[in-house]
Every structure is written in structure tokens, then in C-alpha cells.
Amino acid sequence: MTAGAPCAGLTVVELAVGVSDLGLGLAGGLPGMLLAGLGASVTRVTGAAPAPIDAGVPWGQAWHRDKRVVATDDAGEARALLRGADVVLAYGPEDLVEGRGLGYRDLAAANPGVVYARCRPSRAGGGPVADYGLLVEAWSGLCTQLAGHRPGPVFVDVRAPGIGTASLLTTSVLGLLGRRVSTGAGGWAETSLYDGMLATLGCMIGRSERAAPEIEGYWEKGSTFPNFLYRCADAELLQVWFGGKGMYAALIKVLGDEPSAAGYYSDQMTGKLGERSRRWVSFFAARPRAEWVGLLRQAGVACEPVLGPGEILADPHLAETGLAVRREDGRHHDVMVGTPISVRPFPPASPSPAAERRSGGEAKHGTVRDHGSGLLAGLRVVDFSAFVAGPLAAQVLADLGADVIKVEPPEGEAMRAAAYAVAACQRGKRSLALNIGAPQARPAVEALLRSADVVLHNFRVGVAERLGIGAETVARLNPGAVYCHASAFGGTGRRALFPGNDALMQAVTGFEQAIGGAGNDPIAATWIPIDMTGGWVAAAGVLAGLYARATSRAGSGEQGDEPGGGQQVETSLLGAGILLHSGVFSRDGDLVRGPALDGQQTGYGPGYRLYEAGDGRWFALVVPSPDAWRRLESVLAGAVLPQRYAPLRGGPDEAAAREAEDVLEAAFKAGPAASWVARLRDLGLPAETVEPLDRDGFRRAILDDPVNRQLGRVVSYPTADWGRFEQIGPLLRCGPGAEAAGPRLMLPGIGEHTREVLADLGLPAAEIDALLDAKVARQLAD
């Protein structure tokens, strides 16, 4: 436990019964790891015997490093630990949790203040699926959504169910803890690996009634945007990004290519950008990677080397920013992924006269639009962010009931051109179109900052200060605000000024290489999963900041409307990206990687992978124990598995694992996939067929699923430009008291709420008209 950290003094208990580290992945270990990193004391309760399939999985050594572990099959012993907890994170089948008196209702009767977050087995219209990420990906069709190095579905090693579920659990817990400070009551939240997978797909899944063909085509068919990944003269790979201002022209100049007369966006729309990307293959092959990195960075063009999982831990920047932590046990020296959320109180500062007036009785807010009974109802978030990660964080807060004001330039923020990003990240907000850098806008900007409970941005380091919305300014104007900067590489350290985006982070964190499989070229996931993860991490950071503010005020006896207790929160896209492979760590200078994808992109070994059946269809199989290994052999028509249980490659039983794969691949050619799955399930083995879905089929399977619609995983509402629009909806399910809450289902137009917001801030009508007349502000109707 870390004194002074936002969660210091909290007792967290993880209940993980009948599940495995491999199956749950990040979902089962990361929430507790993050809460421990924020100061909580975490105890992990497991069954007496570890899951046999986890014997070859070292990831838990990183995820559970700061936890006390209790292994017991005694429900009474587990219940005693849970009863004393502030927070319970519960995983496992219902017969082992609720069936043994370890559910929320059982615990809340004795401890009404408990915050109970439940990861349930996944369910949708197709029925239930066991708690293994691979089975959820196969069952849902995600295995078909990325073109691999061979035909057919591939094991998509993007960790989507795990990271999404970890994000849902962590944000739910922090939100419920914040409410508990004022009410004294705890609450429940529930999710599943399937919900978690959906939480990463907001920029992928949508359907419109009448959107322009290029917009609807993206949701129907997927992205055709080039990845700009190049092999250099020394055979090393380099990821390039030039979406920032002036980068496109600078890259063309460095490469010596023909200048672009029309510019980046025009070349993208006409296809010339794709032509250039193909032509540049030969350009980059002319120099070694290190030389290209130096030339491009000197010219202001963003680029990153393509690394393997865990290799970034050796970068000194991670130690400088706390993203790599050291652990010693007397035998080994480990370096592991650190907590990507920093929360600290605002430094003491002299309050502004306005703040002094407010503490003397002036209302903190203008009019705050209360949109329901969510966990954040009555709070205002001022969202200055752009692109994906920052806006998604603000949308999560809107989903929890906050009044979110989206502040963007009069011409609209940069991602307005990418409709999918607007759809995934702006729902439920009010749009204020305002040139915040114009002198005439300063009174409105300061009014915004004074009114905010949360100020959020993802500008590059130093930009917010130049615009007059930096942390010191906010602390002076509004000492009670939570100020969150969601940067690319962090606010300090040698990489702090580097630009970053999803593609660059996929490269440098090992994500692209892991997806490609052993010995293959890297593959990028096209639905910007690290941007999405960055948004969830920033939302969790804000909620941790709000909890810290609430506890500091409660401890000092301040009232809710008084200034003080403000918090400064920092998260980064790099910090979010390294979470995806946070199970990989360095021990005594060597990386401990754990299971890795094979060159055929089938999985981690014979007991956790995809198989092709005799009819050309594929299915996923998990062999979780030695007993299941023996039962599997009974249906193989005389084929013999190695005597030793060897479900995964890469460990001491590598030879047996590869022999077993050969046996199973040959045996499964003897029948169709559906027949094999039925036979395997009859033996109690977890297995799922993989439906051959194209992008449109995949989105329809999600959007048209009746259970998804019933649970609110899918929402439908009218929009001005696209007619009726359908998308993945709010995925945070909490209670009691917040079950019926929900955000406004709408996408704001540029400046749609400008007059309304400025009036809420108390600006006179004449001042609002002057801003609009000077084009410093814009109202949609104008």
C-alpha cells in the first residue's frame, strides 16, 4: 500500500475460482494490479489447486506481484475475507460464486458499503460461453476480422476481451467508490469477457440509415487506409505516422518524393496516398532503420521502431515515468510494467479572486445539465481533447451521467472528418465551438474552467499551457477541479515531446509483432485498439481523481461545493499500450514472455488454439487439464497424444506440445467442424465453432443480437446527418440506483450547444452575440 495514493487504506479482494490466468487474461489480473498501484491493499483468493493450463503461463507473476494470495477451497474462509473488503472483484462460474454464498447480495447484507464488481460468464443470443478469451473471440467471430498470413480465421492476439473487461471493471469500481464517499453505500457492477471485447470495438461497429457511401462503407467493409510500416536496409521494421500538421510535406521532402500539390487529405481521398505508400517501400529499403529514425525525427515526422512484446521495458523513458517498476525477491531482479495512472493533489496555490468569491458563497457552477441518476450525475466535464483516446474518456464519463461539454474549434475538431471516431467517442456530449486561443474568448474559457469538476485534454506537452488551460491555471481558477492530461508518452521523460498515435504504439509496444505470429511480418489491428484502451485508462484516471477529491474533502470536513481537494491526473497512450502485454516482464536481464502466437497464427499450443476441420471450417479448442487431455484422446479414432499433458508451446514440454498439435491437426481432418465441437462438448471440453463472417456479417451479429439490444450493449437513435444510427452502447452496468440511468443518445453537431453552454456559464446575451459575430464562436444554426 502506498501512503498518500488515492486508494490508500482500501482493502480489495479478488475472488478467482474456477478460472485461469490464461483464460481471463488481463481481465483477471489487471484491475487488482491497477488498484494496488493506486495504493490499495489487494488479496487474491483462488482455489487450492491452480488451473493446470496456467502452469506454462508466467503472466500472473507480473499481474499479481503486489497481492497477497490465499489458496483455499473453503467457502467459509473465502467469505470471511470478502466480508471485510471495501472492494470485491469476483470471477468464476455462478455455481462457484453465487452458489456458495459469495455473491453481492450475500455480502452486502453484512457489509452494505462493499463495492462488488462481477465478471460473469459471457452470454448473448447464441448462448453462454466459458471464460476463455479465445472462445469468446471464436464465438463472436472476431477471429475472422483481421487478414492473416494464411486464408481463414486466425488467432487474433489483440487481447480484446481481457483489456476491455479490465477497463470496465476498473472504471466501475472507481465510480462506485466515489459515490460511496457521499452516500456511505456500496454497490454492484457486472460485465463479461464479451462486454470487454465490445468495449474495444467502438470505432469498428456502426450502421447508419443514410450516411454517405464512404462513411457507411467503412462500417460495412472496414478500413483500406495504408499502415505505413516499412522494412529498412538492415531488415528492421519502422512504423511511420504523418497525420500531424506539416508532417506529410516533411516526410515527402525527406524521402525525396514528388511534392503533393493537393495535400494530405486530398491525396487520401483520391488514392494517391495509397500509391505513394507502395512506392515508398523501395525508398525505405535504401537506408538502415536508425538512420531513418534520425532523419524523420529531425524533420518532425513521427516514427517508432517495431519491437517485440516487453522489449520497450528496456527503454529508459519507462523508468523515468514510472511505467516500468523494479521488484527484488532475493533471487531475481525483475522489471515489470508499472501503473499507467498518476494521481496527485494540486500543489498549494493562492486562489484567484474569483475562487475566493466562490468560497464566500458564489455558486461553483452555472447551470449543470443533469441527464439522469448515473454515478456522475450533477458533475461537469470540460473536454478539450481531440482524436480518440481523450474524447472516449469523456464519453465514458457521459455514460456515467456527467454533463460533458465538448470544446472544439469553430471548424470542428480534427477527427470530424473521420466519422467513425466521432460516432465512437462523442455520444452524449454538448458541443461548444469556440476558438479558445482568441483573446475575446478568454472570459468564456475562464468561466468554463471555473465551472468544471473535471478538465480533460490530450494536447501535446506544453500546448495546454500556451492556450491558457494548463494545470497551474486551472488550479488557480478552480482549486477543486480534477485535471487530466492524457498525453502520448507522458508529461515527463525523454520521450515526452514525441507525438504518438495508435499505429506508433502498436509498433513500439510489441502489439503488431505479437499479432503477426512467430517469424512473420507484423500485422496491425485496424480498429485502433490502443487508442480505445487509452480512452478507458484516462477515464479510470479521472474517476480515481474524483475519488481522491471526495476523500480529501471528506477528511477535511469540506462541503461538496467548497473549493479544494483538486487533483492532477496523468495518463498516456504509451502507458495504456504497454498494458496489453503487461504479463511479459524482464528477469535478470532476460524477457519472460510466456505463450506466443505461432507462425500459422493458430494459437499458443495444442490446448489453446484454432483447428481446421475436414470441411474447411475452423473451431477453437481449450484443453484445460490433464483429465481433459485424456478424455480428448478418447475421440481421436486411435490417434495417441503424448502421455504428458502439454497444452502450450514454449516451455519444457515443447516437443510434446508440438507432437500433440500434429496428432490433433491430422485427427480433426476426419470430420466437419460442427460435429467435432458437438463431440468435444459432450466430453466436457470447451470448444466453439468459428463462423466465417465478413465485416458486415460481424457487425450484424453484434447489432442484431436480441440479448445485446436487451442489455443495452447496442443502442439506436436518430442523428441529423445519418438518419437512424446504431452502435455499441454504454457498457457499464452498475447499481443499485444507477440501473435506469443512461446518457443522452445523440451525436452533437459542431457548435450545436454553443449558445446554451455559454448562457449556462452566465455570459450575457450581448457577449455571446459578439463572440458569434466575430467568428470566435459558432452556433450550429448559424
Image (cartoon, grey):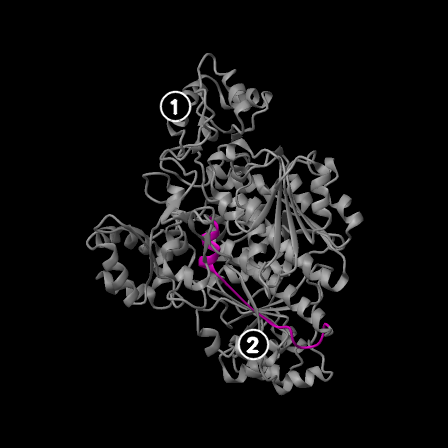
Residue closer to the observer: 296 or 514? 514
Where is 434 relative to 197, above or below?
below
Name the side, left or right, on which 490 lies relative to 206: left
Residue type, label 2 = Pro
* Quadrant (top left/top right/bottom left/bottom right) for the N terminus: bottom right
Tag on residue 659?
1
Q: Residue at x 44, y 63 (%)?
A: 321
Can you see residue 640? yes
Few, some or many C-alpha atoms within 10 Å of disc 1 (few <14, some 14-19, many ≥20)? some
Few, some or many C-alpha atoms within 10 Å of disc 2 (few <14, some 14-19, many ≥20)? some
Tag on residue 347?
2
Q: In the image, which residues are magenta?
A: 560-580
Residue closer to the observer: 770 or 584? 584
Where is 679 relative to 199, above or below?
above
* Residue furthest right as drawn: 109
Secondary structure found at label 2: loop
